[in-house]
């Protein structure tokens, strides 16, 4: 039996409401990798230490950037934010390098299920119960309606990881919650005081489609987790530039050099391009991201603006595997999920090519073993 089939069977036995045929259809063939990444426990300690430092820096720098957030016309909420991830490469010196931070990061629930399916320890005290307690804490912090969570995305059943929405729903229901998956179009009908687990990727609610959601959020009628303020303080790539220029000691060892293309010298950046990676300040995944060694002058001119950054290029980590009896090298990054500054779970994403793609045979999400 394949890894996918075995995992489908595991989920079906744990959550009988999810049928084998439904799960088989929703889980792509390259979502899960049959391999794992093994790292020294010192790497985990460095990651934990740096995550604490980033959280402290985000708090310390608030007074300098608060006006920027206020200009977006969004309220600052009382709750933390679920499902934030710090994504790292591990360099040749066995040190982490921060690639980016994501709010509403996918695969926390499915990652936990994968560890349980493989009967491997997650390395922390994270569990189904802890996942539900995270949402309970969010409800407490923003004084939302107890015991109820709405899981939001635009056309959720069409999303690539819709299966994870179903797993979140099952986990929460097992822990006594009322959990419902909703479309963006359902927002006008959600009761006041509701907590919404927000997988929708309009991070600043700036799209016209988000108008009602933004209005209800600003009025305090709905509570979002994650929310725009978490994105602003951690995941907006402008923060990595700010942290580079913020007097904080000691700075995280994983912080890479970042250049704001709205203020940098164009010719200097062009001359450095082969050592840089270009990306928009506000995006997710690999959208509109370019490796500097491959970028054309035309594309460089197009993206050289105040909406983009150039980040010191970080060589992806690699492991050696055997796929179809052929030895191969797989690149990987580490996705480290946190809540309220505390590490919950570490997953690896194995791939070949320029960016993580979940399309590589033998690639996909994989567990991490720390020795």
Image (cartoon, helix red, strand yellow):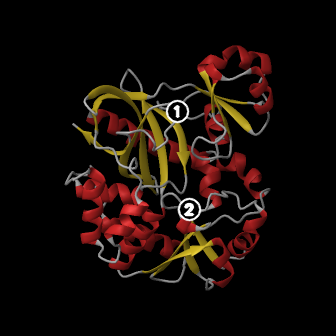
**Above-or-below relation of 63 to 313:** below
Q: In this orientation, does residue 205 appear?
A: yes
Viewer-closest of 182 and 258: 182
Say what secondary structure mark 1 lies in.
Answer: loop
Where is residue 180 shown, x and y percent of the image? Answer: 49, 78
Q: Which mark is residue 226?
A: 2
**Above-or-below relation of 219 to 164:** below
Judged left or right of residue 112, residue 104 is right
Place residue 230 in its image quadrant: bottom right
Say what secondary structure mark 2 lies in.
Answer: loop
Viewer-closest of 12 and 201: 12
Where is residue 344 shown, x and y percent of the image? Answer: 37, 54
Judged left or right of residue 83, residue 243 is right
Where is residue 11 shown, x and y percent of the image? Answer: 29, 66
Judged left or right of residue 219, residue 315 is left
| Residue lying at 53% horizontally and 57% vertically, measured from the top left | 104
**Above-or-below relation of 264 to 367:** above
Residue identifier under label 1: 249
| Residue lying at 49% horizontally and 41% vertically, measured from the top left | 357
Q: Whole-Å distance between the Cαs marked 1 and 2?
A: 28 Å
Viewer-closest of 248 and 236: 236
Furthest residue toward left = 119
| Residue lying at 28% horizontally and 57% vertically, measured from the top left | 5
| Quarter of the figure that contains the C terminus | top left
Label count reads 2
Viewer-closest of 124 and 364: 364
Place residue 177 in its image quadrant: bottom left
Where is residue 155 shown, x and y percent of the image? Answer: 60, 68
Q: In this orientation, does residue 198 appear?
A: no
| Residue lying at 37% horizontally and 35% vertically, measured from the top left | 46
Judged left or right of residue 2, residue 231 is right
């Amino acid at each position: 039996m394949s890894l996918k089939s075995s995992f489908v069977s595991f989920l079906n036995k744990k959550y009988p409401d999810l049928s084998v045929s439904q799960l088989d259809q929703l889980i792509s063939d390259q979502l899960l990798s049959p391999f794992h990444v093994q790292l020294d426990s010192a790497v985990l300690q460095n990651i934990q230490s740096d995550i604490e430092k980033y959280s402290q820096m985000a708090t310390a720098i608030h007074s300098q950037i608060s006006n920027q957030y206020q200009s977006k016309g969004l309220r600052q909420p009382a709750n933390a934010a679920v499902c934030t991830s710090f994504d790292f490469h591990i360099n040749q010196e066995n040190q982490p390098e921060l690639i980016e931070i994501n709010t509403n990061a996918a695969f926390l629930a499915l990652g936990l299920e994968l560890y349980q399916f493989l009967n491997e320890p997650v390395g922390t005290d994270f569990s189904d119960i802890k996942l539900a307690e995270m949402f309970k804490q969010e409800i407490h912090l923003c004084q939302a309606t107890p015991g109820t969570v709405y899981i939001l995305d635009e056309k959720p059943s069409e999303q690539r990881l819709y299966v994870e929405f179903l797993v979140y729903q099952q986990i929460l229901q097992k822990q006594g919650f009322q959990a419902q998956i909703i479309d963006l179009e359902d927002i006008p009908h959600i009761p006041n005081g509701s907590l919404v687990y927000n997988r929708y990727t309009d991070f600043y609610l700036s799209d016209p489609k988000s108008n009602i959601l933004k209005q209800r959020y600003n009025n305090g009628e709905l509570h979002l987790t994650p929310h725009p303020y978490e994105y602003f303080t951690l995941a907006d790539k402008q923060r990595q530039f700010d942290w580079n220029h913020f007097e904080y000691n000691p700075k995280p060892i994983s912080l890479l050099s970042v250049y704001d293309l709205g203020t940098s010298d164009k010719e200097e950046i062009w001359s450095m391009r082969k050592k840089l990676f270009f990306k928009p300040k506000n995006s997710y995944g690999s959208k509109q991201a370019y490796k500097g060694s491959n970028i054309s002058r035309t594309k460089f001119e197009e993206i050289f603006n105040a909406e983009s950054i150039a980040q010191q290029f970080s060589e992806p980590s690699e492991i050696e595997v055997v796929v179809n009896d052929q030895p191969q090298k797989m690149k990987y990054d580490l996705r480290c999920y946190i809540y309220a500054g505390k590490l919950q779970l570490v997953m690896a994403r194995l791939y070949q090519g320029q960016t993580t793609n979940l399309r590589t045979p033998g690639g996909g999400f994989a567990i991490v073993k720390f020795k």
